[in-house]
Amino acid sequence: MPLVQRSGISKQRHLIPDSLSHSGGIITAVLSGVSYSHTLSGLTANTLYFLYMRINSGNVILTSSTSIPSVYRVSFPEAILVGAFYADGMSPVAFGSFVNIEGAPESLPISYTPVWTSLGTNPTLGTTSITGFWTRKGAYALLNFGFQIGSGFSPGTSTYLMSTPTNIQMTSVGLANPLNTLDGDSMFIDNSASNFQYRLSAERSGATAISFRVANSTAQWAASLPVTPATSDFFQSAVSTPILAWSNTPLKDL
């Protein structure tokens, strides 16, 4: 029996469910008053998954795949797209956020842990805990991360870098400046100097790292610039960057 006859859902290639929810690693879609559930497993960090209704052994099921609709339907021509979601960037990897399938793709903030490195000797973090979130806005990602330096910290040497989420790469397409400067606001706060704020300008440094230029200077944020970081100092950044292979095309049209 055709999928549309078994489930009562539309013959169109995509469908917005009555509701779509996630709890405890299980996604539930309600269509025409009938609930369908899908248990998540083996997710890849910061990766987009599409949710499909299709036939399996004569039954209608809800399932997920990283394959875009035009590719997925080569193997499962009856499949109907009903949603999409991103996995997060934590360990273990789990559900991150649903993404709309109509209109430019957008998500809610998704957790990840940025990696703080340098072009010389990496800093020793000690008890420093770095918190990060990324949000998809069409062809762009909004990155928001920060930390307060904890005990056992050592500054390392040379220019500092902060990483993008795993499996998400920046591109220079859409950046209208030769320095690859990113929109946003970043700062380093010196706790020992009554929380004096040093403004920083974020710059794309390759596909997966961000460097920071100290405001009103040619110097980049580094182990000794603008000052040597120490316990109780703060860093925070919120930047927008174009992402490789992302666009404003609705997911239903891929």
Image: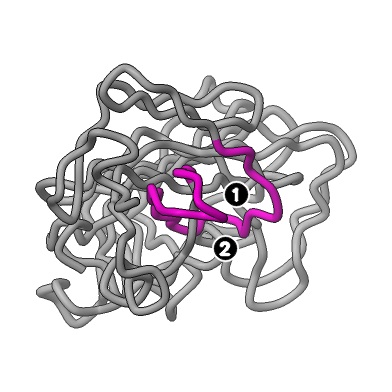
Residue closest to the eye, 75 or 23? 75
Is 200 above or below relative to 96?
A: below
Label 2: which secondary element: loop
First in sequence, mark 2 or 1: give its number: 1
At 14% from the left and 72% from the top, the residue drawn is 174
Q: Which label was assigned to residue 89?
A: 1
Amino acid type, mark 2: Thr
Q: Which residue is mark 2?
A: 166
Amino acid type, mark 1: Gly
Q: Does residue 75 show up?
A: yes
At 72% from the left and 68% from the top, the residue drawn is 157
| Label 2–label 1 contact, CB within 8 A | yes
Q: Position of residue 1 (x, y in %)?
A: 34, 51
Q: Position of residue 200 (x, y in %)?
A: 36, 51
Range shown magenta: 38-62
Q: Which label was assigned to residue 61?
A: none
Label 1: which secondary element: loop
Q: Position of residue 122 (x, y in %)?
A: 75, 66
Secondary structure mostly seen in magenta is strand
Q: Residue 42: within the magenta? A: yes
Is 109 above or below relative to 243?
A: above
Q: Position of residue 11 (x, y in %)?
A: 15, 49
Pick the quarter of the image with the C terminus: bottom left
At 21% from the left and 35% from the top, the residue drawn is 16
Q: Is residue 133 left or right of residue 72?
A: right
